[in-house]
Image (tube, rainbow, N blue to C red):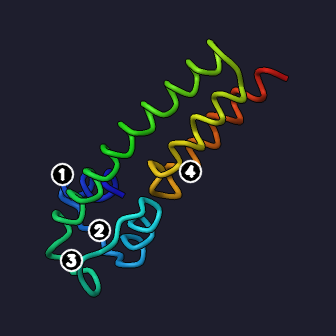
Amino acid sequence: MIAKYTSTEEAGRAVPFDERELMQVYVLLGVQPDHDGFKKELAPAYMAVICQAVEKQNRTLTELTHNYSEIRKERSEVDAAKYLLDHLHAIVSPFMLDSIAACVAYHFDRAS
């Protein structure tokens, strides 16, 4: 979404503002809007919120997946799974849950 609006603005093309699309992104990132409805004139502020959420969640995901992989390699799959369960509170969005599930599936498939 950020690329969609940014690239078209830079090229001088207007993109219709889509409030439903913006709400979907907020939901996927687990971001609670602090207002009723979205306004086109506040789009840059919404993009900033999205960018901040993605950045923070990516940092957390990097830490979780790195530690999971290291524990799995150095100890066991069970210890690695326990690590993720102990840190489940850090997963704050469907986006993060999907990423963690993909990491676990990747390691499980490689072990099979």
Q: Which residue is mark 4?
A: 97
Mark closer to the chain start, 4 or 2: 2
Residue at horizontal 63 percent and vertical 36 percent from the top: 82
Query: Residue 3, how many percent across, how many down?
Result: 32, 50
Q: Which residue is mark 2?
A: 15
For disc 3, the neighbor class at 10 Å (few under 14, some 14 to 19, many from 20) is few
What separation in Å lies between label 1 and label 4 (alpha carbons)? Answer: 33 Å
Query: Residue 111, how many percent across, how many down?
Result: 79, 20
Secondary structure beneath label 3: helix
Residue at horizontal 49 percent and vertical 25 percent from the top: 66
* Quadrant in which the N terminus is drawn: bottom left
Query: Residue 62, how many percent across, how many down?
Result: 43, 31
Q: Which residue is mark 3?
A: 40
Secondary structure beneath label 2: loop
For disc 2, the neighbor class at 10 Å (few under 14, some 14 to 19, many from 20) is few
Mark closer to the chain start, 1 or 2: 1
What separation in Å lies between label 3 and label 1 (alpha carbons)? Answer: 17 Å
Foreground mark, 4 or 2, reads: 4
